[in-house]
Image: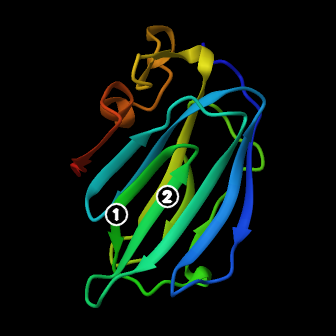
Amino acid sequence: MLTKMDIDALGGWAPQVDGNLRWNGEVRCDRSFVALLVGSANGHLHWAKTELCEPRSLLVLTLHPLRPPLGTQLMFHVGNGFLTNMVAAIEPSARAVTIRLPSRGEAGVLHDLFVVPSESPATLGVLLLAREDVRLGRTGVWRPKAAVSEELPEALHVALEGARKGDVEIVRT
């Protein structure tokens, strides 16, 4: 059974710098946690695992415009984990990004925090697990304990059981 955690997130848009838009905030939990950052865009699922995070940890989304026609690079950070290899075909605009911060979130559930409109909308989210629910490797890479694996989203098992970072093609059936 997953360890219960009190989870919330808060933040807001920072002043624009050199065309970059940045949303700064933090994730707050009642205990140490690990996070699986998940992004989907252009038919791919991207992931990154944090190392062990403090109960109050950084949460940042940066929209970095690239030279036309490349679009906008999406950079997503939680604690010390980050996704930086996603691109959306949009001009950066804070008004365009949908923010879905949980006022109270659940452990072991993928929370889609940001939706970035594009030809193929990009989503950026996070799944949090209590320290007690994972095995930590000597390099900081974690995997869920067998007792909780069945409670986690099946679509994310490749990421949860896999390496620190990766991506897979999303297969539509």
Circle 2: residue type: Phe
Q: Which element is circle 1 on?
A: strand
The residue positioned farthest toward the top in the image shown: 147
Circles 1 and 2: CB atoms closer than 8 Å: yes
The residue identified by callout 1 is: 86
Q: Residue at x 73, y 28 (%)?
A: 5
Which disc, if any, is residue 76?
2
| Vertical side of 95 occupied by 45: above or below | above
Q: Residues within 10 Å of mark 2 (few under 14, many from 20)?
A: many
Which disc, if any, is residue 4?
none
Task: Name the side, left or right, on which 149 lies relative to 58.
Answer: left
Residue 26 x, y percent position in the rendering: 70, 51
- Report if residue 165 is visible in the image: yes
- Observer-nearest of 168 and 24: 24
Circle 1: residue type: Met
Residue 70 x, y percent position in the rendering: 27, 82
Q: Which element is circle 2 on?
A: strand
- Observer-nearest of 161 and 98: 161
Task: Name the side, left or right, on which 74 lies relative to 56.
Answer: left
| Vertical side of 153 occupied by 25: above or below | below
Q: Residues within 10 Å of mark 1 (few under 14, many from 20)?
A: some
The answer to which quarter of the image holds residue 104 is top right
Real-space CA distance between mark 1 and mark 2, rounded to the nearest whole angstrom = 9 Å
The answer to which quarter of the image holds residue 86 is bottom left
| Vertical side of 144 occupied by 105: above or below | below
Q: Residue at x 39, y 23 (%)?
A: 139
State which quarter of the image contains the N terminus.
top right
